[in-house]
Amino acid sequence: MKKNRDRAWYALFTVPLLIIFSIVVIIPFLIGIYYSFISWDGIAANPKVFVGLDNYVRLFQDQRFIQSGWVTLQFTLLALIIVNLFGLVFSMLVTSKLRVRNVARTMLFMPNLIGGLILGYIWKFIFTDAFRNVGEATGWTGFFFNWLLDPQYALFALVVVFAWQMAGYTMIIYIAGIQGIPDDVMEAARVDGANLWQRTTRIVFPLLMPSFTICLFLTLSGAFKIFDVNLSLTGGGPINSTELLAMNIFNEIFGYNRYGLGQAKAIIFFILVAAVTITQVIITKRREVQM
Amino acid sequence: MNKSVKWLLEVLLLLAAVVFLSPIYIMLVNSFKNRAELYENVLSLPSSFSFQYYSEAIDRMNFLTAFGNSLYVTITSVVFIVVLASMTAWMLVRTDNRLSRIIFLVFVSTMLIPFQTLMMPLMQVMDWIRSNTGIPMLNTHEGLIFMNIGFHASMAVFLYHGFIKSVPIALEEAATIDGCTKFGVFWRIVFPMLKTITVTVAILDVIMMWNDYLLPSLVLSSTGLRTIPLATFYFFGEFTIVWNLAMAGLTLTIIPVVIFYAFAQKYIIKGIAAGAVK
């Protein structure tokens, strides 16, 4: 009797969310695998033709997709380094004993709250008009020109905006890590004559490994999946040179109406994201030390 | 440390933070300038503060409607996520059997699936539901809220799960002996103790859903239903050359975020740290 009642409570508490979750995530994921084996243009009246692994063969011959994957890799690597470098430096500055640290922290975190789409638009104005304007005024046209017209610089522009958004976020996580380091450990090192550089590299960094694991994971998966900033800042241009994977998939499906091929790309994208982030977590976890 | 060096560091840090936020400054000053003034110098302060572009942007973006839509969708979604995820996570922690562990594992492992992998089949599922049951899942706020709950369920369950494991069970047992039902135990005793993690879940979800563009762009097609990111996208598409008007529009979209930040700063920063460390 009691057992049945417990089961009923269990169902009452979990089933509502499980139903919604299944409809929104599980079922689409499973039928997504099926869609990747068919050829279809998205119009309900038109037939869905089973083509086996054809889509998977085609996507590896798709130059634009390969190029997009390559650019995404470059973007992710650059973003990873810059975001974490700035996040780490910021966190060390605002955990110092300076009086302006709280104001600085508030200001440095702010861009993270603004959506990627809107950030992209703000920076679009800066990279096009503000840069040109400053270039004309100062004569430094080698740096201050319209970055969005040059394929290489347009990619750098994406990195800058992503870093601007994410640096404050990683800063918060590094701050939590730094504050978790016990004072007596630092004090002991100081008494033993370790200088600032030694204290930072030999004590702070090893003890920060858990924070590195989290920050690298968040920037890695965030950079890989970036879409909003890509859409509003460069729109994939000039001439598709900054079309990152998420946008390439979106265009394939909803732009060119190749639903099967686009879904096959989306499956490959999932495998790539999962493989890269899991590998990273395993590697950095192994380097974490116990106190 | 030397006193003058310390002052220099103070000034340098403040200066770095100000330079960091200069894009916001550029957006703000240019939203007041007329075209000639804007092209002359983008960095200077405006010669006069007229709110002409703001009132025009409010009109063209249908800003007040978009704001109301965003507010409705975000708040409703967050309330549902908090209620459903906390209940589910509590049951999963307190009923330690194989089924609970499998359910939890499924929640956690799906967190790695990118939205791009789900978006197209999801739209097919929603379309199927609409044509077979008549429930309007597409082009309604309620449909969007439903999908928001599904997408943010994993992370919320994960965060609650980790937190509930550290909550002592003794109080719950005492209440059960006193004749409280499971429902009563959860809402009267457990839920109030989850306040810190509830704040974290709510803040993370508010930030993500308020700023989300892609999902609403796929779900909502009527102009009147647009959320702020959608309204911004269409507005910008139309006025991309008219920078002063565009900057006024962008400033408008940021005002609610700044107000939210000003009031909840402490919770936001704590919530972000707590959410990430878990």
Image (cartoon, coloured by chain):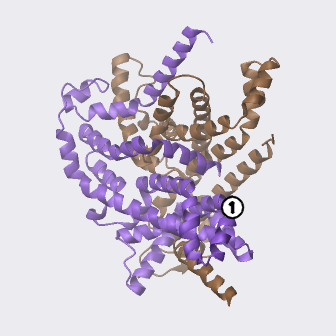
Q: Is residue B47 above or below residue A182?
A: above
Which quadrant holds the N terminus of chain A?
Answer: bottom right
Asked if residue B114 can be seen in this view, the reply is no
Of B270 and A267, which appears nearest the observer?
B270
What residue is at 19 percent from the left and 28 percent from the top? B36
Q: Secondary structure at mark 1?
A: loop
- Of all residues, the one furthest to the right in this rendering is A192
Q: Which x, y percent locates residue A112? A: 48, 42
Q: Is residue A249 left or right of residue B256?
A: right
Q: Reply above or below: B151 against A158.
A: below
Q: Which chain is purple?
A: B
Whether residue A11 sits left or right of residue A122 in the image: it is right
Tell me the brown chain.
A
At which x and y percent is residue B148?
47, 65
Q: Quadrant of the C terminus of chain A?
A: top right
According to the picture, the residue beneath numbered tag 1 turns out to be B168
Image-quadrant location for residue A52:
bottom right
Point 22% across, 46% down: residue: B57
Chain under numbered label 1: B
Where A66 sits versus A53, above or below?
Answer: above
